[in-house]
Amino acid sequence: MSKLFFRFNLVRLAFFQMGFGIMLGFLEDTLNRVMTSDLGISSTIVFGLISLKELLAVFGVKVWAGNMSDSTSIMGYKRTPFIFLGLSAFAIAFALSPSTAYEVQIQHQSGDLLSMIWFALNDFALIKLVVIFLTIGFGLQVATTTYYALVSDYVGERNIGKVASSSWTLMVLTTILTAKSVGIYLEEYSPERLSNVAQFGGAIAFIIGFLSVVGVEKRNNQTDKKSSEQGLSFGQSIQLLSGSPKTMLFAFYIFLSIFALFANVIVMEPFGADVFGMSVSETNSLFRPTMGGMQLIFMLIVGFFITKTGKKLPIYIGNTLSSIGFAMVIYSGIVLDATFLKISLVVVGIGLGASSIANITMMMTMTAGRAGIYMGLWGTAQSLAMFLGNSGAGVVRDIMISLSGDFMPAYTVIFAMEILAFTSASLILPHISKEKFETESKVKMEEMLAASGVD
């Protein structure tokens, strides 16, 4: 393979997650708002629907997809068929989601919880919407897990940081641009225009995903013979993972790191509104552009220099800056200093950018030659952390406000939880060793194969 063609494929792979940026931006911002505010569907139901994509990972879809792509060859390909399966499922379900949401008759119920559950169980359209969001979750987990496995197989450890940083940066940037573009298009709002956005966006996302990966994987790859000789069942994969202390330690480390990175997502703009009295336009123009913009910049910088710095140094720096930044955010809320808040968001953004891409790169290299299985486990820990981070922050906020009668104590607890998570992750990091992990994995794999009678 020529060096030029290899570099071309690296660029293509980096563009893959742009399609998911389009669809996730629409689901988590636009459709979320429409279902909650315009259609009057209970926020409990809406949040539950959107969270299904992470819960599916917790219930093993990522591990299943990774294991299948390790042990199964379809027409000579291991990763590509599962990537296309997941991408197709997500895009089709995504295109159907707005029109189905408009069929739901559940409105805010003034009665008790049992009444709401009774109405929900008798709304066939809501059941259809549950199936659609389950399909979205299935597609997302299958496609991204096998995509990361393909990247790990193809690009080599030297280039993983560049592809990972470019891919995640493009996804986050696409999410921001999609939200802005959709907002402009829907200034003349109608259900038909909303459905048009989903159908067009789903088609564009599929095309981007298809063109990003088609032809990258070699047919009848030489690793197929090895994989077939050492194939594991799904149950054996779970046993391999759970019986390896260093594997589970790294999974816990990923959980802590992702929790720290994402627990702030749903509370930053409410924080600006509740504590500083900012309007919607003010919070929109402050938090995402300032913190998110700095995060994007430093994801790219760290990704392209990580082969020189190593993975752990950017994580230590990122965790430290994030902790300092969130402590500054707490102080800005106590003294009500909006200028200091802006400075705090810059510090937080730099820290999040450095830590996030270094952690993702480390995760993609901790595979011990079985990228599918291990990317499935790391992805499961990541999804659980994102689910608990998002939902847990909201629960803590509501409980603390009800107990204290004030907003600032609630946000102080949330940001303090993130500082604690960043600090705990930094304390665990010295105990993470790629070499020791690979040695343990090899021993456990040999034990597993010997027990199953495989030579």
Image: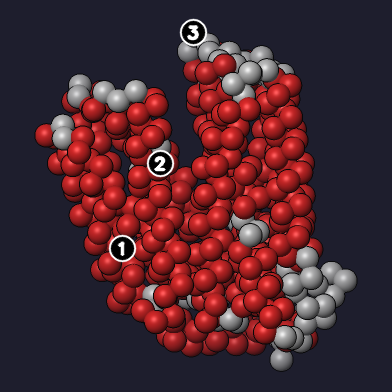
Q: For the view shown, which residue lies furthest in the top direction?
A: 110
Residue 170: percent from the left, percent from the top? 55, 55
Give the secondary structure at mark 1.
Answer: helix
Judge whether 376 appears above or below 339 on screen: below
Instruction: Mark 1: give few (<14), some (14-19) or many (20+) Cα within 10 Å.
Output: many
Question: Mark 2 = which residue?
Answer: 288
In depth, the one of 305 and 157 nearer the eye is 305
Residue 323 quadrant: bottom left
Q: CA distance from mark 1 to mark 3?
A: 46 Å
Point out the tag, 3 or 2, that comes first from the N-terminus: 3
Q: In the image, which disc is placed on residue 16?
A: none
* Three-letter residue code for mark 1: Gly
The amino acid type found where label 3 is placed reads Ser
Classify 10 Å Cα crowding around label 3: few (below 14), some (14-19), many (20 and above): few
Which mark lies nearer to you, 3 or 2? Answer: 2
Place residue 406 in its image quadrant: top left
Where 368 sits versus 347, above or below?
below
Give the CA separation, mark 3 to mark 2. 35 Å
For disc 3, the marked residue is 110
Quadrant position of the N terminus in the picture: bottom right
User: Disc 2 versus disc 1: distance between alpha carbons?
Assistant: 18 Å
Looking at the figure, which quarter contains the C terminus? bottom right
Q: Residue at x 61, y 64 (%)?
A: 14
Q: Is residue 311 above or below residue 225?
A: above
* Kind of element beneath mark 3: loop
| Residue drawn at x 53%, y 13% as measured from the top left | 108
Where residue 318 is drawn, which disc sits there?
A: 1
In percent of width and height, residue 96 lies at 75, 33
| Front of the two marks 1 and 3 | 1
